[in-house]
Image (cartoon, grey):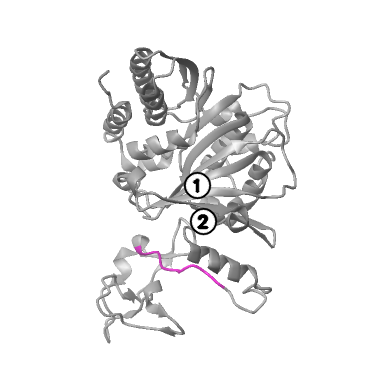
């Protein structure tokens, strides 16, 4: 049978639709398609797909992730039957994904793989939200269909307090509300015991203070078994101008929720520079939950040691009895975010040109600050003319235009 690249087909056709749209609209709706190599890697995280399996894709887009799963089944040439349920609010993408799935199903049927599918043009969050439960993680009384596998690249954007989805989940989700955490919470609820899910989400999900309570609630219901880190900050979605660092987070649903769990065993943490030659470029290792999880001062974090040195540093830091705050230190990220303040950056500091030194992490050496740096290509000066607080975060500085 001739190989048909279903993943690239769905990706390219979807990109053609998005290329006709305004970039601000795409960003506002969080529409960024999963690169084919990433989609195939995510499909592998779902493990063995048995006859009768049911797959959920909460934001199907043009069908890239679902096609990666179907490609897997075609390559395995096992005579099985599965069902796929997908959601998509965008009318044009909804129609395209239906067309792609119709074609992919015909290809799969040629090798004895029967696909029963439906793409619902509905908002996943509003369609699957429980009406009368106090928490999104309480699945004891759920009347919604449950799934053996879930794969998703959820939309990326913050929700304001007036969003109907925020109002609908008020009191049901602890911590900060973001569209992709809603997708993850609902998916964990809809996953059958021992079912597997894989998500590509911003790396900030792992350690951001906003999501500490969400992570704590999530771990009552699931066990993380794999986490992939992209070392490059902006290469994975570079064609979409996404500056988020991303991770692929995979987990398995527990048979019963556990409030206070004793963590033993390991999680597989892998890394690659970017999405190019993903399978060949992966460095993978088993990391104990002792090194993966940190729960100090009420803040639960997922830590991502990608080498022995990282683990040694964690062991050292974990022995510290004091916090920086107790020792009288205050720590903050830089007030200058370069890509938001390009007009204020200067190549170098000169006397009389109204600039101040701009320090990067490369300037900080052992017990000293080295400035200027020879051969350092980034701007080393910052304009001292008036500036204003960034309207996005209220913390960093931008030019007053």
Q: Which residue is mark 2?
A: 304
Q: Is residue 23 above or below residue 123?
A: below
Asked if residue 211 lies left or right of residue 109, the reply is right
Q: Residue at x 59, y 27 (%)?
A: 128
* Label 2 residue SS: loop
As drawn, is 253 to the left or to the right of 40?
Answer: right
Cα–Cα span, label 2 and label 1: 8 Å
Residue underneath mark 1 = 227
* 146 in the magenta segment: no
As drawn, is 243 to the left or to the right of 324? left
**Residue at 67 percent of width and 21 percent of height:** 143
Q: Earlier in the sequence, mark 2 or mark 1?
A: 1
Local secondary structure at mark 1: strand
**In this view of the protein, which residue sits in the foreground, 106 or 262?**
262
Is residue 380 visible in the rendered image? The answer is yes
Magenta stretch, residue numbers: 331-338
Q: Is residue 333 magenta?
A: yes
Image x and y of residue 297, in percent: 69, 63
Image quadrant containing the N terminus:
top left
Circles 2 and 1, Cβ within 8 Å, touching? The answer is yes
Residue visible at 59% across and 58% down? Answer: 291
Q: Nearer the viewer, residue 198 or 74?
A: 74
């Amino acid at each position: 049978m001739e190989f048909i690249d279903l993943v690239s087909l769905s990706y390219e056709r979807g990109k053609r639709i998005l290329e006709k749209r305004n970039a601000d609209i795409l960003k506002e709706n969080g529409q960024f398609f999963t690169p084919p190599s990433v989609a195939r890697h995510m499909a592998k995280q779902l493990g063995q797909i048995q006859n009768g399996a049911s797959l959920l894709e909460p934001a199907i887009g043009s069908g890239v992730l679902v096609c990666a799963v179907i490609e897997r089944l075609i390559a395995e040439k096992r005579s099985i039957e599965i069902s796929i349920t997908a959601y998509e609010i965008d009318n044009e993408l909804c129609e395209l994904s239906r067309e792609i799935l119709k074609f992919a199903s015909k290809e799969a049927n040629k090798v004895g793989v029967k696909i029963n599918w439906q793409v619902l043009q509905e908002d996943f969050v509003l369609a699957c939200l429980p009406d009368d439960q106090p928490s999104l993680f309480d699945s004891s009384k759920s009347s919604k269909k449950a799934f053996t596998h879930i794969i998703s690249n959820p939309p990326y954007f913050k929700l304001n307090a007036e969003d109907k989805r925020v109002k609908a989940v008020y009191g049901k989700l602890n911590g900060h509300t973001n569209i992709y955490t809603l997708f993850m919470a609902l998916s964990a609820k809809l996953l059958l015991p021992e079912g597997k899910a894989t998500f590509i989400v911003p790396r900030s999900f792992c350690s951001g203070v906003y999501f500490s309570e969400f992570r704590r609630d999530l771990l009552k219901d699931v066990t993380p078994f794999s986490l992939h880190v992209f070392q490059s900050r902006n290469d994975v979605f570079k064609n979409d101008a996404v500056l988020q660092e991303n991770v692929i987070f995979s987990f398995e649903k527990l048979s019963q929720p556990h409030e206070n769990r004793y963590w033993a065993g390991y999680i597989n943490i892998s890394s690659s520079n970017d999405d190019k030659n993903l399978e060949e470029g992966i460095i993978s290792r088993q990391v104990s939950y002792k090194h993966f999880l940190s729960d100090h001062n009420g803040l639960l974090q997922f830590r991502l040691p990608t080498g022995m040195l990282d683990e040694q540093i964690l062991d050292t830091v974990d022995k510290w009895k004091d916090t920086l705050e107790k020792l009288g230190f205050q720590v903050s990220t830089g007030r200058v975010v370069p890509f938001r303040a390009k007009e204020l950056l200067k190549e170098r500091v000169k006397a009389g040109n109204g600039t101040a030194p701009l320090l990067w992490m490369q300037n900080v050496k052992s017990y000293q600050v080295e400035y200027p740096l020879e051969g350092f290509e980034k701007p080393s000066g910052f304009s001292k003319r008036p500036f204003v607080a960034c309207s996005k975060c209220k913390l960093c500085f931008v030019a007053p235009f």
